[in-house]
Amino acid sequence: MKACQISPVAADGALHRVDLPRPVPGQGEVLVRVRAASLNYRDLLVAQNVYGATLERVIPLSDGAGEVAEVGPGVTGLKAGDRVAGAFYPDWVDGPITAGARVRSLGANMEGMLAEYVVLPAHAAIPIPDYLTWEEAATLPCAALTAWHALSVVANVRPGDTVLLQGTGGVSMFALQFARIMGARVIQTSGDAAKRARVTEMGADAVIDYKAEPDWDRPVMDLTGGRGADVVIEVGGPGTLERSFRAVRVGGTIVSIGFVGGGAEVNPRAVIGKSIRLQGLTVGSCAMFRDMNRALALHELRPVIDRVFPFEEAAAAYAHLRAGAHFGKIVIAI
Ligand SMILES: NC(=O)c1ccc[n+]([C@@H]2O[C@H](COP(=O)([O-])OP(=O)(O)OC[C@H]3O[C@@H](n4cnc5c(N)ncnc54)[C@H](OP(=O)(O)O)[C@@H]3O)[C@@H](O)[C@H]2O)c1
């Protein structure tokens, strides 16, 4: 089968085109013919070996979708032809996160989705909604599930809540769509005028240019009548966290997800003074993925895809992500 590999240990970011034997599903496993894969900021970290991956060579990318090609012994509930996506953490089946559940993740320390075939534990091959294309379904496992976990499981967003989203990357665009079906009001930031216009078209109630307004917590306060946002989905990290402390309401929730903004040390005093709930999270469980897919199917939400690259141009897809001009998800068709 055709595949790409990276070398996390070499940390050179190079993608190597390889031909590998088609893997064989063992007890309780399924073989999936991958149709599309998608990229996350995390995949840049894996390629640069700042993700803690220790393999000499691995097939990268956590996210992908395809059809079951073969089931191994003992598999029930899935059959050849079923449309599935892989779970980011195959060992996190249900319940709260545990140390063991987050040890293995696709495309870092086990084979990922940038290949024609992948073997997955059957419970981690999650059926995808019928209405989604392969490319759309390939965007779900990391960014979408992270946004779903943050809004519906951690923050328990209620109709009428104000949700503050940062930027227009994969996580934030899914969060916009989920927040809207949950009945929340969305305030979103973006450093790009064209992206701000698109976010408004998609239903954001207010959009702030964080480059022109580095004190963007002030307009958030103005827009909420001095109260602050109920929930902040924090993807900026040290570069934005102190602003988020100011922008969230007293007793509000900040879900700490990413660190695209760079930046320095953070002073936690506001967390204490404003009684902020600051909760980190990492992607989600297989059970959360199934729950999210039910909501997606009901509302027929369409993931925002920036661009689809052919398999042969996988390196260009990585470069496109690195450049940061994308709006939504970057996909590779396989
Ligand atoms: N905890 C988890 O499980 C989890 C899961 C997924 C992702 N993450 C993390 O979450 C972060 C976002 O991931 P992603 O895949 O959505 O990334 P992405 O698609 O690469 O999006 C990055 C976006 O962030 C915005 N941005 C950059 N600097 C910013 C700043 N200083 N303030 C506000 N926004 C800024 C930009 O939006 P504009 O161009 O509109 O300004 C950019 O397009 C990453 O750090 C990633 O590692 C964590």
Image (cartoon, helix red, strand yellow):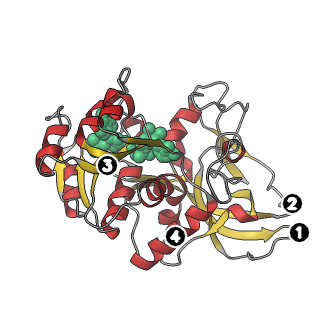
Counting residues from the N terminus, which is met first, the one under dot 1 or under dot 3?
1
Q: Is residue 163 above or below residue 279?
A: below
The secondary element bearing badge 4 is classed as helix
Q: Position of residue 175 (x, y in %)?
A: 37, 56
Which quadrant does the C terminus fall into?
bottom right
Q: CA distance from mark 2 to mark 3?
A: 40 Å
Counting residues from the N terminus, which is met first, the one under dot 2 or under dot 3?
2
Q: Ligand 1: which quarter?
A: top left
Q: CA distance from mark 4 to mark 2?
A: 27 Å
Is the CB of the residue bearing disc 3 within 8 angstroms of ligand 1?
Answer: yes
Instruction: Check whether the beta carbons of the residues at disc 3 and disc 4 lie within 8 A of each other.
Output: no
Is the CB of the residue bearing disc 2 within 8 angstroms of ligand 1?
Answer: no
Q: Is residue 316 above or below residue 214?
A: below
Residue wearing tag 2: 26
Q: Amino acid at mark 2?
A: Gly
Residue wearing tag 3: 168
Q: Residue at x 42, y 36 (%)?
A: 322
Instruction: Check whether the beta carbons of the residues at disc 2 and disc 1 lie within 8 A of each other.
Output: yes
* Quarter of the view holding residue 32: bottom right
